[in-house]
Amino acid sequence: MLIRRHGDIRSSEITPADVYAQRRAFLKAAAAAGVGAALSGPAAALVAPAGQRDAIAGVVETPHGRGLELTDYEFVTQYNNFYEFGTDKADPAENAHTLRTRPWNVVVDGECEAPGEIGIEDILTGFTQEERIYRLRCVEAWAMVVPWIGFPLGDLLRRFKPTSRANYVRFETLLDPEQMPGQRRAILDWPYREGLRMDEAMHPLTILATGLYGEVLPNQNGAPLRLVVPWKYGFKSIKSIVRISFVHGVPETTWWRMAPDEYGFYANVNPSVDHPRWSQARHRVLGEGLFSRKHETPMFNGYADQVAHLYKDMDLRKFY
Ligand SMILES: Nc1nc2c(c(=O)[nH]1)N[C@H]1C(S)=C(S)[C@@H](COP(=O)(O)O)O[C@H]1N2
Ligand SMILES: [Mo]
């Protein structure tokens, strides 16, 4: 199953010039997409990450999300939900350094012909890494726009040959209270678990992210591998994945199990179905300030033209 490749580039082989060239290419693409004005003002700093992390080699630029204004790197990496490292938004950035992301293997099992295990290096070199700018919207009403690096989840899933019995996919985060201090307390039913229906998992917008802002994921954002499903609430985007299982029937997921009235399995961004404790119709954009104008939430977070057909005969009040 594991195909070793030679293109495994060590961080020491990537010069600052490469990183710089990558940034320039990014800026040029953004300018071409008509967001030059947004990038040349104070926002120019937003596309320059801290530059402290390993760059991901050979990233392919895609048109996804060009034209959206990016959320400041500081917000993306310092305002997080990752309960394994604390429940405050500032906790993960402070605490996630205890997570060891190498070596890292992902087990893929369940209803498939070729179950196996794949290492993060094979994931980084064996799949075309693309940059895609996606919105991610958290259930508590903030949204951010991130230049994710990753590849379609379906590309990985197909290699393990799911059988016709597999109609859902289940994901699990690492369980290790040594590395993840939040797991020493029973705040959630660890390990964190999420799931997608097979067609959602295979949808080309669904990616496994390996990086953001040109570099490997910071630990607090779910290193070394996390899900990003741009038309669903942020909690579906499970971090630091170690296991992916093909299953028959809806898998139990962490938040659904904790509070089934508040968090459905689907968790599609839907302005017309309220969360029991707050409206979902409008949201704030992270970085615009606590007293900023609220934005109307678009159906499926703005991806309706690409995903609405997946749910066409479903009652979305019932399947929230
Ligand atoms: N393992 C794990 N994954 C997780 C979470 C978590 O607590 N643990 N929080 C989720 C929630 S609620 C959100 S909004 C997003 C936040 O991703 P970000 O910190 O990269 O913005 O991660 C999701 N993935
Ligand atoms: Mo969230």
Image (cartoon, rainbow, N blue to C red):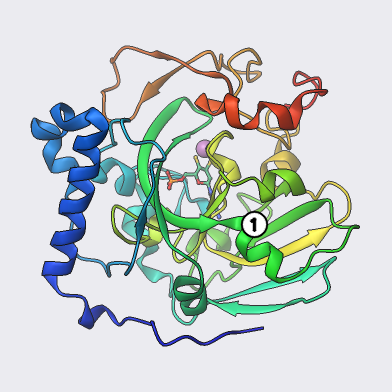
Task: Tell me residue 222's x, y (percent).
Answer: 46, 58
Q: Nearer the viewer, residue 78 or 10?
A: 10
| Numbered disc 1: secondary structure | helix
Residue at left 21%, top 82%?
12
Identify whether 278 is placed above or below 207.
above
> Which residue is under mark 1?
154
Residue at left 68%, top 63%?
157
**Image quarter for residue 8?**
bottom left
Q: Quadrant of the C terminus?
A: top right
**Image quarter for residue 46?**
top left
Outermost residue toward the front?
32
| Residue 199 seen from this side | yes
Task: Tell me residue 220's x, y (percent).
Answer: 39, 56
Residue at left 77%, top 23%?
312
**Image quarter for residue 72?**
top left
Task: Tell me residue 23's x, y (percent).
Answer: 18, 54
| Type of amino acid at the residue the image marks with label 1 | Gly
Q: Nearer the viewer, residue 180 or 143?
A: 143
Mark 1 Cα-neighbour bin, 10 Å: few <14, some 14–19, many ≥20: some
Task: Tell me residue 2's x, y (percent).
Answer: 61, 84
In the rendered structure, the answer to whether residue 30 lies left or right of residue 109 reads left
Quick check: is the Cβ at mark 1 less than 8 Å away from ligand 1? no
